[in-house]
Amino acid sequence: MNCEFKRKLPIPMDVKAMYPMTPEMQQTWETRNKEIKKVLSGESDKFLLIIGPCSADYEESVIDYVGRLREVQEKVKDKIIIIPRIYTNKPRTTGEGYKGMLHQPHPLEDSDMLEGLIKIRKVHIRALKEFGLTCADELLYPENYRYLSDILGYVAVGARSAENQQHRLVASAIDVPVGMKNPTSGDLSIMMNSINAAQEAHRFIYRGWEVDSYGNKYAHAILRGGMNFQGENISNYHYEDLMKVHEWYRKLGLENMSVIIDCNHANSNKQYMEQIRISKDVLHSMSVSEDIRKLVKGLMIESYIEDGCADVENAAYGQSITDPCLGWEKTEKLIYEIADAL
């Protein structure tokens, strides 16, 4: 093989044992899981807000941000369930730039994958232990899900992964809600097919085991916009787009009809301030259509402590070193505005 074998990484229990779940944390996880699923099933009229940095970078600033969300959560708990984004993997289709906490636990230093595995579990454990919040992460590498399988509150399958069969199969075996993004092409049929696949039972190979999955009935859509053949971003959060997705759901007969709107990425053309307007636009669509109100279960917003982004050498504390994010002051105000509009 054209590679060098560096080291054999540990089995899941080795990493999990370093930062284990306590009975109290397990109870919090179970309670949150039930609450989030009730939103997606329509049993609860609360609204999901999956919010946080584009990519988790430094442990202390990420935990600082989660702590701020905890304070806001208490004030809006009657209307909103906040799910912090702690995205520890960052896809790099160009091969350049920060690849996420898993690969680069210290962004300015050489990577150590073992330390990265330990660190991503530690950060998720801290969010749950210190603030009682289960968080979201992206299923970029399905084989690594085992290190966080007992602690995540929400999983997203990204635009470049939703068409991949292994992602769909693993999503069918996950016991927390999984959001399937539309691909970068914007093709809704691919997204809907991925939801259909994830909701079904399957038999497949995972980490050398033959697995029988039961199907994830809480697999659902995330609309993040797309790109045309000229490389121009095209949004898909508008009233007409939502009605199309509603019709797709109806035709396919999928369970727990749900959509999360990703307010950044192609929907905003990566103009982070546009997330404020897009959030309010979606809420307006919900207010004028009962079908859309029942369909849209939440928003995904990229936010951090400081506005914008910078390269890793020049970023301020709590400023994104990947895609630009909405700063904390604007974020806090927006959350309260969303709560007031619901």
Image (cartoon, helix red, strand yellow):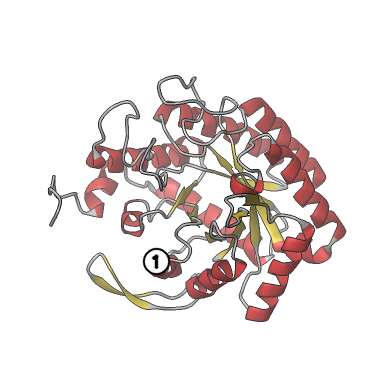
Q: Is residue 202 above or below residue 297?
A: below
Q: At 71% from the left edge and 54% from the top edge, which residue is drawn? A: 237
Q: Is residue 73 above or below residue 190?
A: above
Which is more toward the observer, 169 or 163?
A: 163
Residue 311 image offset from top left, x and y in percent? 45, 26
Residue hosting label 1: 170
Left/right of residue 285 with respect to residue 329 in the rendered view: right
Quarter containing the N terminus:
bottom left
Q: At 65% from the left edge and 64% from the top edge, which residue is drawn? A: 258
Residue 326 image offset from top left, x and y in percent? 62, 32
Residue 206 image offset from top left, x and y in percent? 29, 67
How many labels were placed on the picture?
A: 1
Which is more toward the observer, 151 or 325?
A: 325
Q: Does residue 335 appear in this view? A: no
Farthest residue toward the right?
288
Left/right of residue 42 with respect to residue 152 in the rendered view: right
Residue type marked 1: Val
Give the secondary structure at mark 1: helix
Q: Does residue 174 appear in this view? A: yes
Farthest residue toward the front?
230
Q: Residues within 10 Å of mark 1 (few under 14, many from 20)?
A: many
Q: At 32% from the left edge and 75% from the top edge, which residue is drawn? A: 204
Q: At 51% from the left edge and 60% from the top edge, which residue is drawn? A: 178
